[in-house]
Amino acid sequence: MRPPPLLWLLLHLGAAAPTADSPSQLPAPQNPKIHLYNAEQVLSWEPVSLTGDEGPVVYRVQFKYASGSDWFDLPPSHSHRVNCSRIAATKCNLAPAGQEPAFEPQYNLSLRVRAELRGRASVWAEVPWFQRSLNVTIGPPENIRVTPGQGSLTISFSPPFNVAPSMGHFSYNVHYWEKAGGPPQVKDGVENNLIELKDLKPLRVYCLQVKATLVWNAGTTSRQGLFSNVSCHETAADASTKLQEVTLITVGTFLSLTALAGACIFLTLRYRGLIKHWLHTPPGVPVQIGEYLRDPKQPVLEALDRDSSPREDTWDSVSVLSAPEEQKMLPGTWHQSPGCPQPAGADSEL
């Protein structure tokens, strides 16, 4: 029996009406993907393009736990202001900076996104299941600093991101090797941010890489991180090496100075005549001759003759005085007249 026309029309309209979860009036977002790197959790997709100027398109993101079948809008009750409902951007940040993430890392989730425009919507574009503790990509440690020591290298760094102690912790390992050649060595299982590599050769260049491993407390699962870039550093000299270096420098300096002095003595003896010739001062022209050559009319020669004429010898008069003493008569020297007595104190005449 055929139903009445009015009932047939209502059934036809009901079958043609789109359901809430499968509208097809708008194109669906393409290539949805989840980005999990360190503390970053971002869902992104390509924008929906419309042929006409119909107005701005907005997007809605929903999530579902693996243990359930119901989908929920973001923000959920525990999302701490993470809003991904009716947004104009083509990405949803599930862990904004300075805020707690929307989901705990041990949750197994699925996400989906659709486009909406004035009561119309597209079909949902889903993202495969993921769990942050298992699918996150852990970057290398940050702020790596290497301090050379006496036959050692001290490495300090900070973790790739902060993890609550109740959730998990990081452990670190270092791969290092001598740049000139040698087998690589590994130091792993270090749970602090300071690693010291000991027993290295002094004054040698070593290259190294550091990696972090995230260990979750729930289920004792771990996630290996990425290695840092290779960096090379030279170790400092120890006490014995410094003493050897000082000794070698002293001996080398002494031998160099000795060789230099010997070379100077040899060259001086070998080329003594040439050195004497170089050091000999050439004779100069007297001033008067130079003036005469500049102006022959000047009576320079006569002045030279006058200056060079011998001077008369001059004699100084010398007086010889003898101190008064007793006169000593020498035989045959004095002839005293009877009437002329010799006065006392008279000088003897030679």
Image (spheres, rainbow, N blue to C red):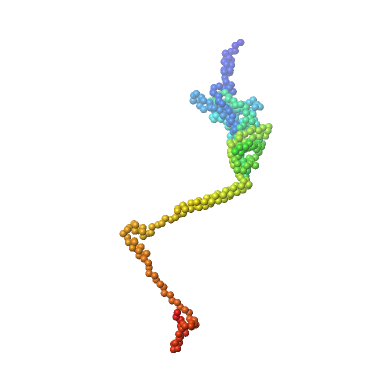
Image coordinates of residue 150 in percent, x first then y, are 62, 44
Image coordinates of residue 250 in percent, x first then y, are 58, 50
Q: Quadrant of residue 307?
A: bottom left
| Nearer to the camera, 33 or 126 | 33
204 w.r.t. 313: above or below: above
Horizontal placement of 172 versus 25: left or right? right
Q: Is residue 81 visible?
A: no
Quadrant of image for the C terminus: bottom left
286 w.r.t. 128: above or below: below
| Nearer to the camera, 347 or 138 | 347
Horizontal placement of 265 versus 299: left or right? right
Image coordinates of residue 6 in percent, x first then y, are 57, 15
Image coordinates of residue 313 in percent, x first then y, are 39, 70
Horizontal placement of 256 versus 104: left or right? left
Q: Is residue 17 visible?
A: yes
80 w.r.t. 243: above or below: above
The residue furthest bottom is: 339
| Nearer to the camera, 349 or 166 | 349
Question: Which residue corresponds to the image point at 34% horizontal and 61% vertical from the top-left?
Answer: 301
The residue furthest top is: 1
The residue furthest front is: 332
Question: Which residue corresponds to the image point at 45% horizontal and 85% vertical from the top-left?
Answer: 335
Quadrant of image for the N terminus: top right
The residue furthest left is: 297
Q: Quadrant of residue 107?
A: top right
Horizontal placement of 307 versus 29: left or right? left
300 w.r.t. 27: above or below: below
* Number of numbered discs: 0
